[in-house]
Amino acid sequence: MLPHAADDISRDGKSLILAYDHGLEHGPVDFEPNPDTADPERIFELATHEAVTSLAVQKGLAEAYYPDYEDEVNLLLKLNGTSNLWMGEPNSAVNCTAEYAAGLGADAVGFTIYGGSNHEIEMAEEFREAQEGAREHDMAVVMWSYPRGQGLRNDGSPDVISYGARLGLELGADVVKVKYPGSAEAMGDAVEMAGPADVVMSGGTMRDDKAFLRNVSNAIDAGATGIAVGRNVFQRDEPERILDALEAVIFQEADPAEALAIAESDD
Amino acid sequence: MLPHAADDISRDGKSLILAYDHGLEHGPVDFEPNPDTADPERIFELATHEAVTSLAVQKGLAEAYYPDYEDEVNLLLKLNGTSNLWMGEPNSAVNCTAEYAAGLGADAVGFTIYGGSNHEIEMAEEFREAQEGAREHDMAVVMWSYPRGQGLRNDGSPDVISYGARLGLELGADVVKVKYPGSAEAMGDAVEMAGPADVVMSGGTMRDDKAFLRNVSNAIDAGATGIAVGRNVFQRDEPERILDALEAVIFQEADPAEALAIAESDD
Amino acid sequence: MLPHAADDISRDGKSLILAYDHGLEHGPVDFEPNPDTADPERIFELATHEAVTSLAVQKGLAEAYYPDYEDEVNLLLKLNGTSNLWMGEPNSAVNCTAEYAAGLGADAVGFTIYGGSNHEIEMAEEFREAQEGAREHDMAVVMWSYPRGQGLRNDGSPDVISYGARLGLELGADVVKVKYPGSAEAMGDAVEMAGPADVVMSGGTMRDDKAFLRNVSNAIDAGATGIAVGRNVFQRDEPERILDALEAVIFQEADPAEALAIAESDD
Amino acid sequence: MLPHAADDISRDGKSLILAYDHGLEHGPVDFEPNPDTADPERIFELATHEAVTSLAVQKGLAEAYYPDYEDEVNLLLKLNGTSNLWMGEPNSAVNCTAEYAAGLGADAVGFTIYGGSNHEIEMAEEFREAQEGAREHDMAVVMWSYPRGQGLRNDGSPDVISYGARLGLELGADVVKVKYPGSAEAMGDAVEMAGPADVVMSGGTMRDDKAFLRNVSNAIDAGATGIAVGRNVFQRDEPERILDALEAVIFQEADPAEALAIAESDD
Amino acid sequence: MLPHAADDISRDGKSLILAYDHGLEHGPVDFEPNPDTADPERIFELATHEAVTSLAVQKGLAEAYYPDYEDEVNLLLKLNGTSNLWMGEPNSAVNCTAEYAAGLGADAVGFTIYGGSNHEIEMAEEFREAQEGAREHDMAVVMWSYPRGQGLRNDGSPDVISYGARLGLELGADVVKVKYPGSAEAMGDAVEMAGPADVVMSGGTMRDDKAFLRNVSNAIDAGATGIAVGRNVFQRDEPERILDALEAVIFQEADPAEALAIAESDD
């Protein structure tokens, strides 16, 4: 964790990472609720929304679209990832080197670690290489810290999530992405464990506006610096509208009801 | 996926890849229907047919023959591949580096990934190295995206094929080769998932002229940019004749009947 | 083992390594007895106590805090480590290269080897790389020598601990950290086996002041050069007080009762 | 396969490789029929026979003897090989790099691949490195193509041997060494599958003069360019005599009876 | 095997390697018969005895002591080795690179290979790297050739020992250390198989003076160039005395009785 390393992918210390690696991780099924979003162009356009502080994609999408968006979008290149055709213990292929990401103009790199997996050690060593490579090129390091594996019964418990947040700090991430642990209090614990590293909650599967924004609001109140969100934006009929609301919650500390009112009035 | 990266192995945005890696992948048995085609020279000659936009071979054949054909044939060097003596989970040895392929004059590299195999992650990481090496040498990247493995029941389903097409885009391929998923509509889905990456259907096992050309025609109508074909050309008695017909279907958008008529008249 | 290599992390040939890699190795649970110590800043402050000759942390903490403490604290960068989410045979991920540690200003590197684990050989080879890298950058090498694994019934026996001490010497460590083997005599054996390499006892789980200091005093009497201690400092209500006492025991060869008296009078 | 790459280890397009890696592959037992041949000097002397176009040995023998024979003998350095103490699936250690072989003055490198072994893919990738290294140093590449492994029932069938010959061509060998498949016709098939790559039969276990020479003669008639032979030379009482006969069969296309007569008259 | 490579660690073509890697391989238990010998200084002093042509130690001991002995002792740095806490198939960690050994002033490197182990192939490939590294730095290569593993019933049989001797020659060792195979005749066979490579017998477990010297004398008579001995020297009450006797047997070809008499008279 380097102080200020994440400044390029945040604003006033807050961040909204628009995550769009679902085509690799989950496949076409994630685009069914809103078929237009299978088109990466639609998402790069969304990423120009002023609420969005960075866009997380795999190498192939960055190669194809980022040259046209580099003035308006901050690129968070996700370095590893695996299809869900994979049946083995949780693991993730390194699809892009830090060096290549830097060549694509990335402001930050993203890396998943499945703590507790039989592949944890190998993933941590790959993370080391990514992290040290990112430092050479002045890119921020965002860890997707998702404890998961055959020996781990309850990977969504507050204790495990707090542990995951700490792993990010210890191993050298500037930002740690963790699941929302179910309450503001538990989120506060995770934030405390991450120390000076930023903590962002992951958006997760789609929920209704209020429930979703309530969690985000709780997370911000608990000290999280923002969210990394994909499906809860692009699977909605009006992705821009939820971005408006998220902007209010994250950057203006509006409560969910206010935020939705602001989003309505923007229409 | 880099815009225009595949221009050197296509014409007017369309492509016909003559694939000839069967000596490695399947062995001599594939040459039995037309024994002359065991001789690589016969295939390099075929590749000078104006319908063919590139020829896909392994390193050894490129070393032996390409110096005599480099003015007339675009070389797509297949970097990995494995004999069918191999009994393990689907996997593929990296038989050639991108650097060596560039030294042989390749315009593009080809790489197989078996999504869902127990070796998927290792193959994806080998692909990364090949892809980044290809970028250094300005060679296009063609992915043979063939989900296959012990955990995958139905590797020919439209959903799996669409997922395979998307993998190509996400991981940085310029062209993705997928199986024909059984209908124009399903092919359209795969094409949509690949976004700006080109999709070519694989020729597969030999079928009669009309059935074969009908599939190709459907694929083109659905947005595929062409075909990668081996057995459906070289296992026929008159390989040039089917190339004539494919040329009509792919580049002139003739329907199969017209295309066969054109092929006849060329005789 | 290089003569004088450990001079930078010792004083008058004695050393007190404040170890703080528990956030990675054990997780948040270790901070519960004294919640303030979850904050690394609290520990870096502690490390400025004159008793402390070096602070052992993982890369992420060094990146975040060491620039503010480099004048007052000697950095011992722990190069490997693994979360206790890991369920496999004892093993440890290499989270930092020696080169990167040198760039962070480290005076020494730390490395765990689990002799007897199914991963012993791989860990020894990773140690080689770390050790030779440390030599290039004039950093001392501290081995956490913890025999442990499926085939090892009694990993706390004096024989095993002596063997562990010898491994440190043979493989090129300057300082070997071993468990306290239960008696001054057994500690003396371990010290003898380590030859010219320094031996420090590990602090282990928290015990009451007298029992803890008695062990430390015995170890010093037996020739150990000091201690590497974490929980027995930061899990107490008054970490500074036990550091005062440790200083008396280690550097002034006070007996435990005297040392506690000195610590009281410092209040 | 590079045209003319094998010129340095052949004469008039024909070749007789004297193979002497048995000390590694089989151990001392192979020298029992003719104990003098345990002494490598005896074999280097044999290799000066005008019939011999190259001598295949492991690194250690080349280091010890080749400096004295480099004017009279062409060196084919066998890069991999394994003792028969090895009990696992067929595999072969890479005992020498191509670079080191070049430094020893090698004209060619030899490499075994066990197609169908559980180690096939790893061996193919090691072959890639050897092959590309050989190209850098202008050394010919000879593949010992021996399909063998737990999943392969009949590794001596003509089909499997033809497939092995093709593997050599596809993967970039200049010369492929295969077992004699039992008939001239089957040998012809293998030769055809190897295309422009040279095919040499392996000598195999010792047989009587006529049976042995008959196979060699059949192989030459079928288009093989020669033989790689060890035991059928050095396990005989008069190795020079069989070399005389082989020279007649291979280079003068004598039939076995003529060849034996020539050999007699040379005495 | 390079002619004259071992000259720096022999005298008049004979050699006595004092081996002292027992602290790693066997642990403190080996020092119990003569506790002073746990102190490496005692052994470095012994190594200045004129009978000793080199001292074999691991990296850590060389770092600590060799600078004070480099004028009087030839250093044979053992590059691999493993503790006997290891429970797996015979294997050995590479604890030192050839480059690092050269930096320490080594005249030779030592490397163990367990032929027949499930790790044989990996060890042979690590040996390759060590051997080629040694050549770059003009260090002799000594192989500890110890066939051993789950598939090997009788690893002390003359046949297996002869095979081990040959492995050393084939793979590029200058000196091969093998077990004494039980008779002068069997030792002669091993020596013959090693060709121009030197063969030294390993001292093995401690025996009485006469039995031990008888074996050494037989080995020398059979063509061995010397011995690599540890326990049979340092576990005795008077290590210098047995070195006197060994000197007589090895360098003056005294018989055991004469040698013991000479050793007595030296007192």
Image: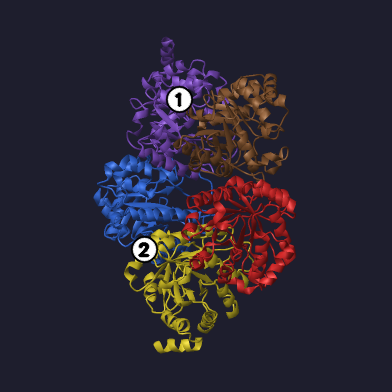
Chain colours: A red, B yellow, C brown, D blue, E purple
Q: Determine whether, in the image, residue A199 is placed left or right of residue D73.
A: right
Tag of residue B104 = 2
Near mark 2 (Cα within 10 A), the count class, few <14, some 14-19 or many ≥20, is some
Provide residue B98's location: percent of width, then percent of height: 42, 60
Q: Determine whether, in the image, residue A212 is placed left or right of residue C170.
A: right
Provide residue A133's location: percent of width, then percent of height: 50, 51
Near mark 1 (Cα within 10 A), the count class, few <14, some 14-19 or many ≥20, is some
Residue in view at x 61 percent, y 39 percent: C117
Provide residue A181's location: percent of width, then percent of height: 72, 54
Provide residue B146's location: percent of width, then percent of height: 55, 67
User: A21 or E129: which is nearer to us?
Assistant: A21
Q: Amino acid at mark 2?
A: Leu
On the image, which quarter does residue C236 sit in? top right
On the image, which quarter does residue A203 sit in? bottom right
Check chain identity for marks 1 and 2: say if they share one.
no
> Is residue A254 positioned above or below E79 on the image?
below
Q: Secondary structure at mark 1?
A: helix
Q: Nearer the viewer, mark 1 or mark 2?
A: 1
> Is residue B109 positioned above or below C60 on the image?
below
Tag of residue E65 = 1
Q: Determine whether, in the image, residue C163 is placed left or right of residue A255.
A: left
User: D247 or A46: which is nearer to us?
Assistant: A46
- Give the alpha-carbon distance from disc 1 to disc 2, as whole Å: 54 Å
Q: Secondary structure at mark 2?
A: loop
Residue in view at x 65 percent, y 63 percent: A247
